[in-house]
Image: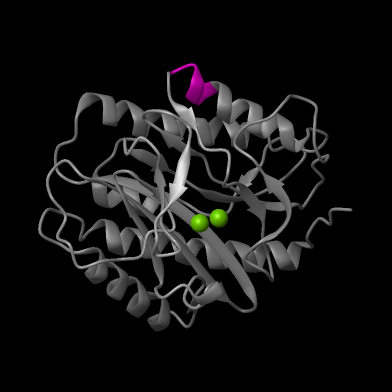
Amino acid sequence: MLRGKSEEEVALVRESSLLVGKTLAEVAEMIKPGVTPKELDKRAFEFISDNGAVPGFLNYNGFPNSLCISRNEAVVHGIPDSKPLVDGDILSVDCGVLMNGFFGDSAYTFAVGNVSDEITKLLETTKRSLEKGIEQAIVGNRVGDIGYAVQFEAESNGFGVVRELVGHGLGRELHEPPEVPNFGRRGKGPRLIDGLVIAIEPMINLGKKEVTQLRDGWTIVTADRKPSAHYEHTIVVRRDKAEVLSTFKYIEEKLNVIV
Ligand code: MG
Ligand code: MG
C-alpha cells in the first residue's frame, strides 16, 4: 500500500530537491573541455556541505562520491574520475542530497562543447520523455501510464529504453516504493495517489536498450557502447498536475538554454 506524504513532508523534500537543482547549476557552470569529473564532484560536495546538507549518494551502499557522473556510453552510477572532459562528450550528472531528514534526487545530461546532431536529438528526446512522464503523474493514473509515456516518446524517435534501472519513490529514504519503470502499459501498475513523491528518471540509449555493468561494481554502460542520456526530476503526484519539486531552472540559466 503506497502512502502519500503530508504537506510538511512534501515541503522538506521540496527544500532538498531545490538544493539539488542549485548544486547541479554550480556544476553546470564548470563543465567544459579539460575539467575532470573529480573536480565537479569536489565542487558538489563543498556546495552541499556549505548549505547544511549531506550528499545523498556518498557512502550509499558504499558509493565513494557525492555525484554519479556517467560519460558517453555510461548510463548511470558512474564514479567521478580524473580523465579530462573533451569536446563532444556528454555527461550525465546525478545528484542527491539529504537535508532535515529528507532526500531530493535529480539528474541532467550536459553536452561538453559541440556534440553531433544525433546526440542533440538524444538529449532533447530524453528530456521531453521525462516531461511526458511527469504529465501522467496525476491522481488516478497508474505507474504504467508514466512508463508508457516515457517509452513511447523515446522509442518513436528510434532510441532504446533501459529496462534494468528504474525511477522510485523517495522521502526519508533515497529509494522507497513504488518502482517507476521507464516502460510500461497504460492502466497497469500501482495507482497514483495524492502526495506520492517519486523520482522519474528516463535512461535512454542512442542505440540498443541493453546495458551491462563495469567491473568497478557501479558503472552501468550500454552493451553496444553507444551514448546514453539521463534526466531526472523529483515530483509529487497531485490531482490535476504533478508538482515538480526539483528544478532545471538554475542549470539552464547557466547554460543559456531558452526554456
Ligand atoms: Mg538520481
Ligand atoms: Mg533517482
Q: Residue at x 49, y 70 (%)?
A: 57
Q: Quadrant of the C terminus?
A: top left
Q: Horizontal and vertical percent for residue 122?
A: 35, 30
In the rendered view, tell whether residue 3 sits above or below residue 51: above
Q: Residue at x 36, y 77 (%)?
A: 45
Q: Nearer the viewer, residue 217 or 15?
A: 217
Left or right of 67? Residue 198 is right
Q: Horizontal and vertical percent for residue 219?
A: 41, 57
Q: Nearer the viewer, residue 55 or 60?
A: 60
Instruction: Give the magenta range.
Output: 153-157
Residue 259 lies in the magenta-colored region:
no
Residue 154 lies in the magenta-colored region:
yes
In the rendered view, tell whether residue 144 sits above or below residue 173: above
Q: Quadrant of ligand 2?
A: bottom right
Count of marks placed on residues:
0
Q: Is the magenta region chiefly helix, strand or loop?
A: helix
Q: Nearer the viewer, residue 69 or 106?
A: 69
In the rendered view, tell whether residue 32 sits above or below residue 201: below
